Image (spheres, helix red, strand yellow):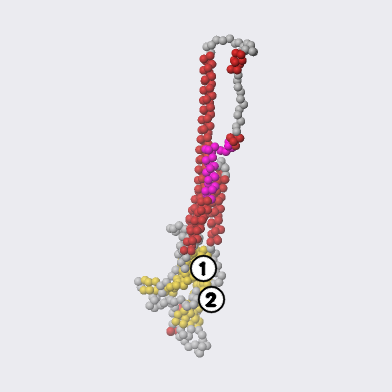
Amino acid sequence: MFLRSISKIDDYKMEYSVQLTFREQWTDERLKFDDIQGRLKYLTLTEANRVWMPDLFFSNEKEGHFHNIIMPNVYIRIFPNGSVLYSIRISLTLACPMNLKLYPLDRQICSLRMASYGWTTNDLVFLWKEGDPVQVVKNLHLPRFTLEKFLTDYCNSKTNTGEYSCLKVDLLFKREFSYYLIQIYIPCCMLVIVSWVSFWLDQGAVPARVSLGVTTLLTMATQTSGINASLPPVSYTKAIDVWTGVCLTFVFGALLEFALVNYASRSGLNKANMHKENMKKKRRDLEQASLDAASDLLDTDSNATFAMKPLVRHPGDPLALEKLRQCEVHMQPPKRPSCCKTWLSKFPTRQCSRSKRIDVISRITFPLVFALFNLVYWSTYLFREEDDETF
C-alpha cells in the first residue's frame, strides 16, 4: 500500500480523505502457465472480472471511487507460478472517531481497515507483506496536522457466522498547535487584557467603562461560538472549552467589577452628603442655641432702669478702668489650617475611597489570577498530552 496524499481531516464529521495505491497478491493454482523458458515473465490483464479475486472491502469507508483518467488506473499481472498481483489507485473518505478532550493539544489515531466480506478465515486469510508493507509519499503536508508515524496490525472480527480476516493501518496525527495559538489563544488573551483597561479609567466615566466591558464580552462570546461551530457537539469538556470559558469569565468579571465600583461610589457619595447635612444641621442648632441664650440675658436685664452715663468719669479713677476692662472685646484672627491637614484634604474621604480601592485591588488581582490559571492550564494539558499517547 502506498499513501499518495491525505487531503482533509474533518473534526466536525470525524472523517479523513486519502488517496492511495492499493496492491494485493495471492496465488491461484489454476492460472499457472509455461513461461517459454523464461522469456515470458508475466501476463497483464485490465479487466478484474476475468479472474477470481478476494472479496476485500474497506470496513470504515464512507465514500470512495476509482480513477479512470486517462486510462483506468488498474492492472492485473499473472505470473507463471499462478501468483496474481492486483494494483489499483483509489480515493477514499474514511471514518475516524476522535477523542477531543485535549483539543487542540491532541493527537488522533485514524485507521484504515480492510476485511473479507463473505469468506471466513477457514477459506481466506489476509497477511501483511514482510518488509515494508506501507509506504508514504515524501514531504506529505497537511494544513493543520502532522503525520508522526503509522503502525500495521490485524483486526480479525468474530460474528455468529465465523471469524473474518482483517488488516488495519493506524495513522497517528499530531495537531499543529501554532495555528490555534494565533487564531484562538492569543486573541482571547488580548480580549481579557483589554477588559482590564476599565480598571484604570475614572469611576465617573460610566459610558466608557460600560461600552468597553460590553464590547469585549460580546466579542469573546462571538469567538467562543465560532470555535464551537467548527466542532461536533460532544458530551465532555474539551481543553478549548476550559480556556474560552475562563476567559469569558474574566471578561464578565471585569464588567461586574465596574458595577460594584459604581455602587460603592454612589453609596459613599450618599453617606458623605448625609454627613455634611448633619454637620450643617448641628451648626445651625448651636448658632440658634447661642442666639436664644443671648436673648434670655437681654430679657432679664430689660426690667432694670438706668440712665445713659459715660463709662469713664475720671480717667484716673481705678474703678473706671476696671469697667473699661470688662467691656473690652477680644478679636482673634482665624486659625490657619496646618500643612498636614491641607495635604490630607486632597485625598478622598473614607467613604469615597472604597470604590477606588476596589479598582486598585482589581488591577493586581485579575492579572495574578489569570497568570495562575495559565500556569495550571498549560502544565496540565501539556503533561496529559504525553500520557494520552497510545503508540
Q: Position of residue 97 (x, y in %)?
A: 45, 64
Query: In terms of depth relative to the viewer, which is nearer, 89 or 202?
Result: 202
Main SS of residues in magenta: helix
Q: Earlier in the sequence, mark 1 or mark 2?
A: 2
Q: Does the magenta stretch include residue 293?
A: no
**Which quadrant holds residue 55?**
bottom left
Determine whether 32 is above or below 192 in the image: below
Mark 1: few/some/many CA within 10 Å (<14, 14-19, 20+): few
Residue picked out by circle 1: 148
User: Magenta segment, which residues?
Assistant: 344-367
Task: Using the image, determine if residue 79 lies above or below residue 179.
Answer: below
Q: Which amino acid does label 1 sit on?
A: Glu
Task: Measuring from the top left, give residue 44's x and y in whole percent.
Answer: 50, 82
Q: What element carries label 1?
A: strand
- Residue 366 seen in the current view: yes
Residue at label 2?
A: 71
Badge 2, how many Cα within 10 Å: few under 14, some, many 20+? few
Q: Where is residue 370 in the image (x, y as percent from the top left)?
A: 52, 52
Residue type marked 2: Met
**Secondary structure category for the residue under label 2:** loop
Question: Is residue 348 located in the magenta-colored stretch of the structure?
Answer: yes
| Residue at the image position 58 percent from the left and 9 percent from the top | 307
Q: Which residue is drawn at 55% across and 72% down?
A: 138
- How far is the residue under mark 1 from the one under mark 2? 34 Å
Q: Are marks 1 and 2 in contact (CB under 8 Å)?
A: no
